[in-house]
Amino acid sequence: MKATAKTKALCALFAGVMLSATSVTYMQTVKAEEGLPSGISKVMVKPATDDGPLDEIFSGWHFRSKETKNLQKDDFENPGYLWVEQGEELWSAVDGAKDKSCKSCHDDPAKSMKGVGANMPKWDAKLKRPLTLEQRINTCRTKGMEAKEWKWESSQMLSMTAFIRNLSRGMPMNVQADGPMKPWVEKGKNIYYTRVGQLNMSCSNCHEDNYGKYIRADHLSQGQSNGFPTYRLKWQKLGSLHRRFKGCMKNIRSTPYKVGSDEFVALEIYLAQRGKGLQIETPAVRN
């Protein structure tokens, strides 16, 4: 059933109340940082270009409670490391008709995968399109190993992406934004600023216009992607960036795109470009 103009107006009003009536800015309520996540030297950087929408770029870590931060500070306490460890085991696991593993082609991941997670999504010249880390892994599995694809949110895929991204921890995000990637950046930017759903909201309404304010009982962050895949306390497990995209779209009463869709890939590229310079924190811990 289509929403009437009155219903849309009420939904928009409700959304505004959620963001403003109980809003207290982050800087008014949270003191200076007390330590940083393990392997991270900074959680705030200046934008890579002067034409960006933000004066300062903050990691989602910056907006979390002391209790949540403490979970990420210590690798032993960080629950996301269960997936990183499983990914390390999968690296050497033989699979597929060719009886190969990731190690068969890439050998020592500490050398071959260092920096890979900081540069994804990346342009694939043969396929003439960008690939996310998940898509790159599945391409390796189907072409190089002749093995079945892993589902996007499967334990295997989350473990492998967490393992590979963790090998770039502390390195700044540096996704290509020019050349053949430029149209994808623009597509992602358009999605980021387009209002959708019954609440008639865009990504920017929360993560640019109102970051640092309370929404319900949580602080809104800038929506940066440097910690994904991320362990969310709400999920009680690790989850991908595209799962977070879907959740946001559902929250504003919009029909989400599919994980791995061109729309979400473009949005991921734009977010990575928007947060360029922030250090990889995978696996981050968030509310």
Image (cartoon, rainbow, N blue to C red):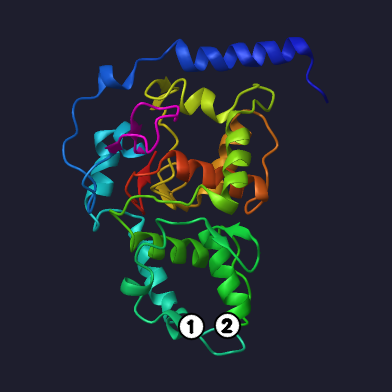
Query: What is the CA distance from the residue labelled 2 to the residue labelled 1?
Result: 7 Å
Element marked by disc 1: loop
Question: Mark 2–mark 1 contact, CB under 8 Å?
Answer: yes
Identity, as a three-letter code, of the amino acid under mark 1: Ser
| Mark 1, residue position | 101
Q: In this view, does 16 lie to the left or right of 89?
A: right
Residue 137, numbered label: none
Q: Quadrant of residue 106?
A: bottom left
Residue closest to the far right = 1
Q: Where 21 falls versus 256 (above or below)?
A: above
Residue 272 lies in the magenta-colored region = no
**Location of the C terminus (image quadrant):** top left
Q: In which quarter of the image is residue 196?
A: top right
2 or 1: tag closer to the N-terminus: 1
Q: Is the magenta stretch mostly helix, strand or loop?
A: loop
Mark 2 Cα-neighbour bin, 10 Å: few <14, some 14–19, many ≥20: many
Residue 96 rendering spot, x and y as whole percentages: 59, 84
Residue closer to the observer: 237 or 39? 39
Residue closest to the far front = 179
| Residue in view at x 33 percent, y 55 percent | 79
| Residue in view at x 57 percent, y 39 percent | 247
Which residues fall within the magenta stretch? Answer: 44-59
Mark 1 Cα-neighbour bin, 10 Å: few <14, some 14–19, many ≥20: many
Element marked by disc 2: loop
**Location of the N terminus (image quadrant):** top right
Residue 127 rendering spot, x and y as whole percentages: 65, 66
| Mark 2, residue position | 145
Residue 47 lies in the magenta-colored region = yes
